[in-house]
Image (cartoon, rainbow, N blue to C red):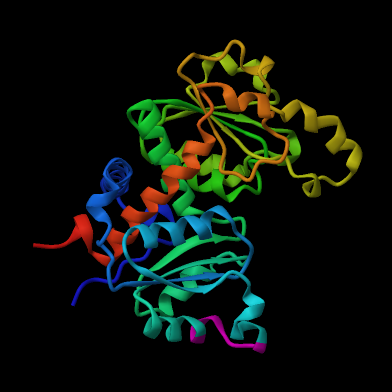
Amino acid sequence: MRELRHLIEPEDFTLAELEEVVDYGLDMFENPAKYSDACKGKILASLFFEPSTRTKFSFDAAMLRLGGGLIGFADANTSSTKKGESLGDTIKVMGYYSDIVVMRHPKEGAPKLASKYSSVPIINGGDGGHQHPTQTLTDLITIKKFKGQIEGHTVAFCGDLKYGRTVHSLIRTLARFNTKKFILISPEELALPNALKRQLKENFDLEIKEVRYIEEVIEEIDVLYMTRIQKERFFNEEDYLRLKNSYILDNDKITLAKKDMIIMHPLPRVNEISPEVDDDDRAVYFEQSQLGVYVRMALICKLLEVGPYVRG
C-alpha cells in the first residue's frame, strides 16, 4: 500500500521534491498533450469553504487537462456544513467519492485537521492567514521560468506583509532555497510579523532589509512581489489614505529597475499595480497565474503517483 502524502505547507516537501514539481510543471506547460490522460479515471474534490477564483479554477483546469473529473463546491452554504456536519465527517465521506481533495478554509489549521481524517491526499488551497502552498509552487515555477533558477536572487515583498498568507509561505520557502537577501517594503502597520523575521534570521544565512518605499531599493531588486494594501487592516481611514498611494506601482517607480527584474503578484489586483505596468516586459503576473495551472497539474500527479510519477 502506497504512503499517503498531503501538501499542507511547503515544508511537507523537500527542496528536491519542490523543484521536481516545478520542473514537471514546466514540461507540462511546454508539452501538455503528453499528460492529457495522466489522471484518466481519477476524481478531484474541490472543497472551498471561502471564495476563490484563481485557486479553485486553476485546480479545476489542472484536473481537466490531466483527463480527470471534478466534484465539489465553491460555497460552504451549499454543503452539509450549513447543517452542522463536522469537517472530519465531510472529509471521510469525500474520501469515498474522490481520489484527491483540495480545500480552502477560513480557519487556520483546518486542512491539517482534515488530513487526519482523510483516506486520500489533501491539498491546502489556503487556510486563513496561515499558508498557501500551491501559490508558493506557482511563484516558484514563475521565478524558475523567467529567472532561470530559484536560488540566489534579491527578492522584495511589497504591501501587506503582516496578513498575507502568500507572502508567509513564499518567504519561508525561498529562504530554504538559499535566497541571500529579502527586502521588505511596507507601512509599519503591515510589516512582516516579528516571529517570522526571527525564525528566518535564526535558521538561515540571509540578509533582511526593511524600508518604507519602493523607490529606496528599486535598483537592487531581482524579483518584486507585490501585494494589496488592505484598507480594512488600518485602525483609521486617515492612515490608510496617507499611505495607500505610496504602494501603487507605476512606470515612474520602475524607471531605474533592472532590465531583467520581474514583477509578480498573486492576484487579485485592486489598485496596487497601475494598468500601465501591464505592458512592461518585466510584468509577469498574468503569466504567473497561467503557470499555476501547470504546477498544480504536476502536484496532482505527484500525490496520486500518476503521469511522470508512476513507479516502475
Q: Is residue 110 above or below residue 287?
A: below
Which residue is at 57% across, 56% downward? Answer: 130
Name the quadrant containing residue 270.
Answer: top right
Which residue is at 50% across, 87% downward? Answer: 89
Which residue is at 55% across, 47% downward? Answer: 166
Q: Is 66 displayed left or right of 237 in the figure? A: left
* Observer-nearest of 199 and 133: 133
Residue 236, position in %: x, y? 89, 44
- The quarter of the picture where the N terminus appears is bottom left
* Observer-nearest of 215 and 191: 215
Residue 203 visible? The answer is no
Name the quadrant containing residue 193.
Answer: top right
Residue 161, position in %: x, y? 63, 41
- The quarter of the picture where the C terminus appears is bottom left
Per the rendered image, the range of residues in magenta is 83-89
* Observer-nearest of 27 and 181: 27
The mark tally for this picture is 0
Residue 109, position in %: x, y? 54, 67
Q: Residue furthest front?
A: 33
Q: Is 220 displayed left or right of 178 in the figure? A: right
Residue 289 visible? The answer is yes
Q: Residue furthest top?
A: 256
Magenta stretch: includes residue 10: no
Residue 122, position in %: x, y? 41, 69
